[in-house]
Each structure stands twice: as structure tokens, then as C-alpha cells.
Amino acid sequence: MANAETHRPPKRRRWLLRLIFVALLVSIALNFYFYERYKSYFTDGNDPIEHFHSGSKVATEKIAVIKVQGVIMAPNTQRILRRIQQAKDDKDVKAVLLSINSPGGAVADSHEIYHRLVELRETKPVVAHMKSMAASGGLYVAMGAGEQGKIFAEPTTWTGSIGVIIPRMQMIGLAEKVGVESTPIKTGPFKDALSPFRELTPAEQTVWNNIIDQAFDRFVNVIADNRVELNVKEVRKLATGQVYTADDALKNKLIDKIGYEEAALDELLTRIDRKPDDVRVITYDNQETLVEILLGSAQASHPDAQWQFAMESTVPRPMYCCSWLSGLTSGPFGRN
């Protein structure tokens, strides 16, 4: 017992070690704080981060892989647009591979991504590669490869689903059983159009048909403009909302070849006249900062956030999406 007491550090020394340990923790916390402040001051904080994918790790010239994964809606759309912009601005990026794994999404979001890809391909070749699904809006953005670009699909890819949908629930029967009646105070006959608590009037049906017909025509024309072997009439025959396998898509000229990512990269290397060891293939990732994570958690727990989500889920959304529930949810589809 006396021997154990002999080897025990003096009380003053133990307190000193504890103070040093606490000071170290405080120092680490302060370093994290100032690092986050540094990034927020000198950088956007939303800029995509480059990651090595394949090829030469020391090559200066690059091929950028831009991933379009998940439902094409905010905030996913903004991440994709930032990746396109970064690839466009980077002089070392010589070509772009568009890697798509998406059931589609909002009409406006799909078209904005396509529009930015059209701008990108004016200076850099773009090739599209479809993974497990590139349907509806996923097919729409694939058209960003253009007439000169190629579209590859894996053997098990599902694509197609050309068309527009505005999700709408019919709850008249449920409301009657529960004893609920919807009586909105409105300024015009179309202000509560698409209400799930009553039937659409003929006039409302005409209004919404006009809206989705215009979005549908745009979809058809985008495909006809970018697929050399298809015209508007031929695209309309394919535009039944049907999902096509890779084999069917190839037969119907919606894609150029069946192949994996390696084949799509080889096509780009041929386009820019480079060998695999001449370029560094990179991908982009958007990471939330510590501050964004903390703010996001705080906002999600705010009572107004729940009300905002409920309101947004009822907003009519024309969708290029392979889902009858599109617009009501934007759950995960693959990783982004």
C-alpha cells in the first residue's frame, strides 16, 4: 500500500495535467472555429471539392465527371449547377463526363441543368453515361451532350419515361368520411385549382392541360434537337411515359451505345486526342461546413420549418419524373 502511494503523482501535478488537457481541448475548438471563419471569409463555402477518380495523379489536364444523382430538385439542383460551372471555368478541364443516376425531377430544374450543359459543350466536349436509371428529367439532362456527344447506357439501365406529370391526390371520399369540408377564401375561380377536396372543373382541366402540354412540347423538342436520327414526330411516338430498357432505348435511338463508364471515358479521350496517362479524371463533391450543419439542424427543429414543408408539399409541380408521387417527396435516390 505504501508502495502505491509512493508512485502516485503529487496532487498539484495531477491538477496541472488536467489544466493542460483542458487547455488543449480549448485550443482545438478555437482552431476549428477560426478555420471555419477563414473558409467563410476567403471562399464561397459552397464550391465543389475535387477528388481523384482515375488516370494519372500527376497530369495537369483533366476530365471532370459531373454526377447527376437523385431527384432533380433543390438543393440537389444547385449542387449540380455549381459543378457544371466549376468545370466550365477550370481551364485544365478538357472534357466532361455526365454520370446520371436519376428518376428525373422538376421541369424547371431539369431544363436549367440542360441549359447550362448546352453552354458548357460550346467549349468542352460532353459525353453522357446512364447508370441504373436516367428516366424523364434524367433523360432530359442527358440531351446536354448534344448532337456531337454520345450517350452510353449500362446493360441494366432504365430510361425513357418521356412526359410530364403534376401529382395530385384525390381525397373527397376520405374528407366525407371524416367530416371535413374545404372552404377556402379566394379571389378567383382558379386560385384553389388542384385542390384534393373537390373535382377539377372543365375550365381548370383546360388550364392545367395547357401548362403540361407546353412542358411536354419542350421535352419532345429537346430530344429531337439533340438526337440526329430522331425528329419530332418520331419522338412523340416514344413519348408515352413508358420506361425503356437499355436495349429498347438503343433500338429507338434514344442512346448511342451500351457500355459502362470506362467506355464513355474512352470516347472522351478519343474526342480530345489524349491517352489515359495524359489526363487526371476527377469528380466533384459538395460538402456542408460545420456551420451549415449546425444551422441546418437548428432550422429543421424550428416550428416554422414544419409548416413550410407542409405548404411546399401541396404546391403544384410539373415534373419530368418517373414517379406518380413526384413533387410530394424528394427522398434519397443513390448518393450525391
Image (tube, helix red, strand yellow):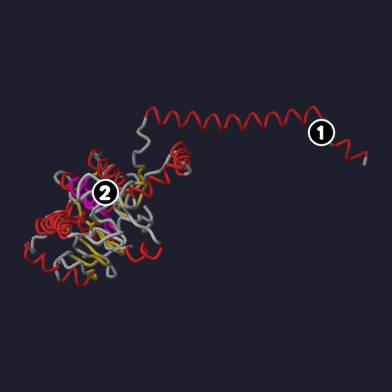
Please, is residue 5 above or below residue 112 in the view?
above
| Amino acid beneath label 2 | Ile
Query: What residue is pinned by disc 1?
Result: 9
> Where in the figure is residue 293, as x and y percent of width and height?
46, 41
Image quadrant assignment for residue 332: bottom left
The disc label shown at residue 293, or none: none
**Magenta extent:** 94-116
Rounded to the nearest whole Å, what is the CA distance between mark 1 and mark 2? 60 Å
Pointer 2 local density, CA inside 10 Å: few below 14, some 14–19, many at least 20: many
* Front-lying residue, 34 or 199: 199
* Front-lying residue, 168 or 95: 168
Identify the residue at image location x=40%, y=31%.
40
Query: What residue is pinned by disc 2?
Result: 63
> Where in the figure is residue 214, as x and y percent of width and height?
13, 54
Pointer 1 local density, CA inside 10 Å: few below 14, some 14–19, many at least 20: few
* Front-lying residue, 332 or 229: 332
Identify the residue at image location x=30%, y=49%.
184
Regarding residue 299, the answer to whether it shows in the image is yes
Which of the two labelled residues, at mark 1 and mark 2, occupies the earlier sequence position? Answer: 1
Identify the residue at image location x=36%, y=58%.
333
Secondary structure of the residue carrying tag 2 is: strand
| Amino acid beneath label 1 | Pro
> Where in the figure is residue 237, as x and y percent of width and height?
11, 69
Secondary structure of the residue carrying tag 1 is: loop
Please, is residue 35 above or below residue 265 in the view?
above
